Amino acid sequence: MKTILLIGLGRFGRHIAIKLNQLGHEVLAVDRDEDRVNAVLPYVTSAQIGDSTKESFLSALGVRNFDVCIVAVGDDFQSSLETVSLLKELGAKLVIGRAARDVQEKFLLRNGADQVVYPEKQLATWTAIRYSSDHLLDYIELSGDYGIFELDIPDSWEGKTIAQMDIRRRYHVNIMGLKEKSGQMTYSISPDTLFPIGGTMLVLGQHKDVQKYFHL
């Protein structure tokens, strides 16, 4: 469990709050809009109404005590930039900023953000890859050319072992998990692991290799 300071409770911030609650983390949520704060109260440990661009307000929150500070402000980039900068000046351990454009990502990183999320760009990439492929069920971009892909297991692989298919040498990918048709997931993968019938697999590899060998 982590302690998380979440600043900005628009649609994006609210969805983060709900998910963090499901994951069991302690969350202090902050927004200058009282209605937004009230809307997330069922999903957070505590919440405050305030202006995150004010140093005195942020300082009173004790930002050093949080494992992660997420700045999810999306409708006012100037406020987001100022908040990120102040958080780092006050000693925040890990600051995550939100960008809506490439130039915003650059400014956030230059002004103290440790990492930047780019929801629209990331979702656009996921949508383009996911829905332009017949056998791809899910996709997570890692870095550069690499990703994790959930793929249908080819019919010719069913009932055979990882070793029999010589996965790494022939296809240049790693099998991270196998899902049975029933939905049961197996992450303990060895050379003797059998590919289930009618299941899916989690594959780690480069985009070009996955596209080439799995016809995406």
Image (cartoon, grey):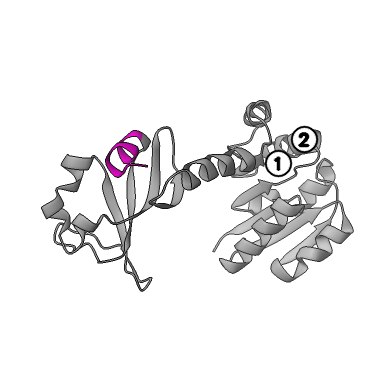
Rendered residue at 26%/54% (across/down): 154
Badge nearest the viewer, 1 or 2: 2
Q: Secondary structure at mark 1?
A: helix
The main secondary structure of the magenta stretch is helix
Tell me if 146 is positioned left or right of 11 in this view.
left
Q: Residue 82 in the image: x percent, y percent?
A: 77, 35
**Quarter occupied by the N terminus:** bottom right
Q: Which mark is residue 77?
A: 2
Q: Which mark is first along the chain, 2 or 1?
A: 2
Rendered residue at 18%/62% (across/down): 193
Q: Residue 111 in the image: x percent, y percent?
A: 68, 29
Q: Residue 114 in the image: x percent, y percent?
A: 58, 37
Residue contact between numbered discs 1 and 2, judged by CB atoms under 8 Å: no
Q: Relative to 171, does residue 4 appear above or below in the rendering?
A: below
Magenta stretch encompasses residue 2 = no
What amino acid type is highlighted by mark number 1?
A: Leu
In this view of the protein, which residue sits in the foreground, 15 or 113?
15
Q: Residues within 10 Å of mark 2 (few under 14, many from 20)?
A: some
Q: Which residues are magenta?
A: 208-216
Q: Secondary structure at mark 2?
A: helix
**Quarter occupied by the C terminus:** top left
Rendered residue at 38%/51% (across/down): 135
Residue 158 figure quarter:
bottom left
Q: Residue 143 in the image: x percent, y percent?
A: 44, 36
Rendered residue at 67%/40% (across/down): 98
Tell me if 160 is positioned left or right of 50 in this view.
left
How far apart are labels 1 and 2 at the CA level? Answer: 15 Å
Instruction: Give the residue furthest to the bottom.
Output: 182
Q: Residues within 10 Å of mark 1 (few under 14, many from 20)?
A: many
In this view of the protein, which residue sits in the foreground, 58 or 163?
163
Q: Which mark is residue 87?
A: 1
What amino acid type is highlighted by mark number 2?
A: Phe
